[in-house]
Image (cartoon, rainbow, N blue to C red):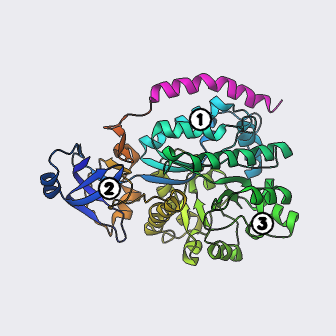
Amino acid sequence: MLVVNGTLITWETPNRILENCAMLVRDGKIVEIAPQDDLVNRFPAEERFNARNRYIMPGNICAHTHFYGAFSRGLSIPGSAPADFVEKLTKLWWPLDRSLDLTDVRYSALVCLVESVRHGTTTLFDHHASPNAIEGSLEEIAQAVEQAGVRASLCYEVTDRNGKEGAQAGIRENLRHIQAVRSCTSRKGQIGALFGLHASLTLSEETLDACRTACPDGVGFHIHVAEHSVDEYDSLQKSGLRAIDRLNKHGILGPNSLVIHAVHIDTREIEQLKDTSTCVSHQPRANMSNAVGLPAVESMLRAGVKVCLGNDGFSNAMWEEWKTGFLAHKLVHLDPRRLPAEDVVQMAIYNNAELVKNQFGIQAGILAPSAEADFMAVEYYPFTPLNPGNLPWHMVFGFHESMITDVVVGGKILMKNRELTTLDEEKIAFEAQKRIPQVWDRFAKEFN
């Protein structure tokens, strides 16, 4: 296709905003960006994608999410509300993931993928759990991702909280999925694989060693770390080491691994993340919802840690995560200078794009020749000047997901003029609602 009549926000380094330019897409990749008249004259027969004076920019990337948590929306927790993070796990998330069967897993992914496309989120890193439906669960999600047309890296969380056999089943599911990804050329660049671990506080020394031994070379781990201080104290009790030290000892860190949250790590742990080139993902909305505090994002960035941005299962509207992070750190530190918009951009655009390149071997999150044709059209009409220098502040104060009109991944149109083309939103919601009574009934029985 030839993308015409739009203003291109490239998110290159340095970023450019290009007017009167067009973009040629072939075989799912961007081939050329040049003045529109030039490209139209050279390729008069090319199919046109008419941007209708909208902004064209790369699709959003989510560095960490949980599709399986979708059915928690509106769910009533029996008894008193969770008083802290541990109670949130034991009263909500663990009973919920035990309540899912394989069909529930598929539909919880599909409803999240509808939101992803609508909100311009084109690549996601999912972390899955369904203890009573482990085998084949990642394939259910992979098929949903394939149906939607987005890209996703998948893993299953290994944990000891469901017994030794549950941990072994989680290891097997990770290995099955990793092998499936490596052997399926048709999904190359669309479905990725990491080796999932829940968190240090639910993993024994024996299980960590078993995961490290089982994980194939070149595959990284996807694990929650120090979301709450309980993770650090549990690690100290088990091993005499803080959480990052413990994971480093077991060979879990590294350039292919992704650490989530890192709220309660100390300076030495930050150094280890930097020295091992381990990526970190920040989820400000989840940190606020769980009342666990906020990580030292600016210190990690300054130390050279690649801090990315995810959503932890909140709606896949990544600009909401941008705005929340931009505001929350100012409030917590009582300082309006904290986490400036350019740091948010560094995480959400540049570091997330590097994460995708490392995990999928593709270039996304940028409009440039040879990059994947993953982009969206945005109906934004600024009433003040917009330029590369002030764009980050337009992003946090002006842009909104409701302005997204079209979404394209790999040159395939997933949403056109706000109409989904690959997913039937009404049917998916209808089928999901049919499953909810059974899921919520199983959830309630967890408390009997």
Q: Is residue 368 magenta?
A: no
Q: Which residues are magenta?
A: 424-448
Q: Describe residue 442's horizontal placement relative to residue 182 as left or right.
A: right
Number of numbered discs visible in the structure rendering: 3
Task: Tell me which amino acid carries mark 3.
Answer: His
Q: Quadrant of residue 23?
A: bottom left
Residue at x 23% of width, y 49% of height: 2
Q: Nearer the viewer, mark 1 or mark 3?
A: 3
The residue labelled by disc 3 is 250
Up-down relation of residue 176 to residue 269 (above or below) = above
**Of the image marks 1 and 3, the number of the one nearer the N terminus:** 1
Q: Are marks 1 and 2 in contact (CB under 8 Å)?
A: no
Q: Secondary structure at mark 2?
A: strand
The residue labelled by disc 2 is 30
**What crowding class fits label 1: few (fewer than 14 Cα within 10 Å), some (14-19), or many (20 or more)?**
many
Q: Are marks 3 and 2 in contact (CB under 8 Å)?
A: no
Task: Tell me which amino acid carries mark 1.
Answer: Ser
The residue labelled by disc 1 is 108
The quarter of the rendered structure image containing the C terminus is top right
Residue at x 38% of width, y 60% of height: 366
**Of the image marks 3 and 2, the number of the one nearer the N terminus:** 2
> Whole-percent x and y of residue 289?
62, 50
Q: Is residue 438 magenta?
A: yes
Q: Describe residue 176's horizontal placement relative to residue 204 as left or right.
A: left
